[in-house]
Image: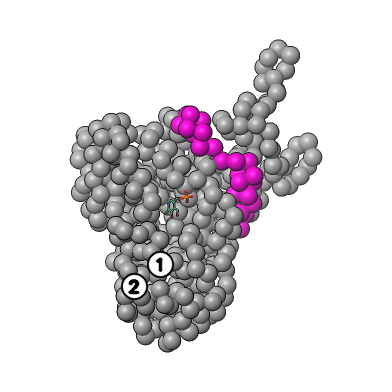
Amino acid sequence: MKKSPETLAAQAGGRIDAPTGALVPALHTSTTFARDPGYALVGPHEYARDDNPTFLPCEDVLGELEGGAALVFASGMAAASAVVESTVRTGDHVVASRAMYWSFRNRLRALADRFALDLELCDPGDVARAVRPGVTRLVWIETPANPTWDVVDVAAAAGAAHAGGALLAVDSTAATPVLSRPLELGADFVMHSATKYLSGHGDVVAGAVVVRDRGPLWQSLRAHRRGAGSVLGPFEAWLLSRGMRTLFVRVARQCESALALAEALAKTPGIREVLYPGLPTHPGHAIAARQMRGGFGGMLSVRVDGGRARALEVAGKLTVFARATSFGGTESLVEHRASVEGPGSLAPEDLLRLSVGLEPASELLDDLRRALGA
Ligand SMILES: Cc1ncc(COP(=O)(O)O)c(C=O)c1O
């Protein structure tokens, strides 16, 4: 019987370790793999910078979740860099939605400087229009996008990219494969910071890219990973595999709590605006409702009355939310993005980003209301 993605995730791929009968995948720390007296490799592996047996459950499960073939990387940034560096050549035109994880926006700018790329950063709604037929090589979008949760229409971006001869990459970190499957909407690359929801416990830095099959895109990503050495450590791969077992239940709960918080905060005095694609007032709601299923994610941001000082004051008074960067873990986090990103940040000064964890939504709401004095 074909197992559903949810079952495969819960069972870490469902393999049984042949020599031992173990249900939990083994953690292989060996960097090198033996050859027989005739100098043939004893197994399918040679050296741990190429790949490692501990990767396999992660890559198999993630491939099934996204409907493609996955590769894991040392971090989300390594995964994203591999997509760009294995796709573009000097002088290529690259379109990217400006609304994206700031550090990768900076990385794209740095790559553009060094390799004379013609990088065009545009508004999320202008991605399709920015594609220049026959000229654009890569289109990069993140949806929902940090930290305002702008939504980009993946199918429209894929249509425009392909009509112009370009490839579409989607950073789907915030959506997770539970809520969105960009390959089915036409994307060529799906990228994840697996540091976030996929691993889900705040204890692994990891990244992943999924492409449709083990064809040329997969081959060149794998060659890039081997050449750049951006390989995930076996312990991190093991933790990622363990974390993905609970992905579906975590994301379902986080979506439910985030929506409850967004709805309640929209009516709370002291809050100017709630940014959450699940609210009908969010500009990306209609597209999100079309391309996400089962929820709108566990991330939302609030803009508070009173600007930067007030936002920092509110963050300082929270006791259930931890003040820390990153997201997608079991504990709720609050972050003043403008402080973290520093000069040049596009994040509004009055914005607090909330990563909703697994605590009861009522406790999180009480914490926010008390901090706001509402
Ligand atoms: C949306 C998004 N993409 C990519 C990254 C980079 O991932 P990593 O920190 O795993 O390198 C992050 C990190 O915060 C992110 O939020």
Q: Position of residue 245 (x, y in %)?
A: 62, 54
Indicate the quadrant containing the C terminus: top left, top right, bottom left or bottom right. bottom left
Q: Would residue 245 be counted in the magenta stretch?
A: yes
Q: Secondary structure at mark 1?
A: loop
Tag 1: amino acid: His
In-image side of 302 versus 6 (left or right):
left
Q: Which residues are magenta?
A: 223-247
User: In which quadrant of the rendered view does residue 351 lie?
Assistant: bottom left
Residue drawn at 29 percent across, 51 percent down: 97
In-image side of 107 versus 261 (left or right):
left
Sequence-first disc among 1 and 2? 2
User: In which quadrant of the rendered view does residue 216 lie?
Assistant: top left
Mark 2, residue position = 308
Q: Secondary structure at mark 2?
A: helix
Can residue 204 be spotted in the picture? yes
Q: Nearer the viewer, residue 255 or 171?
A: 171
Can residue 365 be spotted in the picture? no
Q: Residue furthest bottom?
A: 374
Look at the magenta stretch and give its main secondary structure.
helix
Q: Position of residue 190 (x, y in %)?
A: 43, 45
Q: Which mark is residue 336?
A: 1
Q: Position of residue 166 (x, y in %)?
A: 29, 38
In-image side of 155 versus 367 (left or right):
left
User: In which quadrant of the rendered view does residue 272 lie?
Assistant: bottom left
Kindly report the distance in space between the C-alpha atoms of the residues bearing marks 1 and 2: 9 Å
Task: Sort mark 1 into few (<14), some (14-19) or many (20+) by Cα contacts within 10 Å.
Answer: many
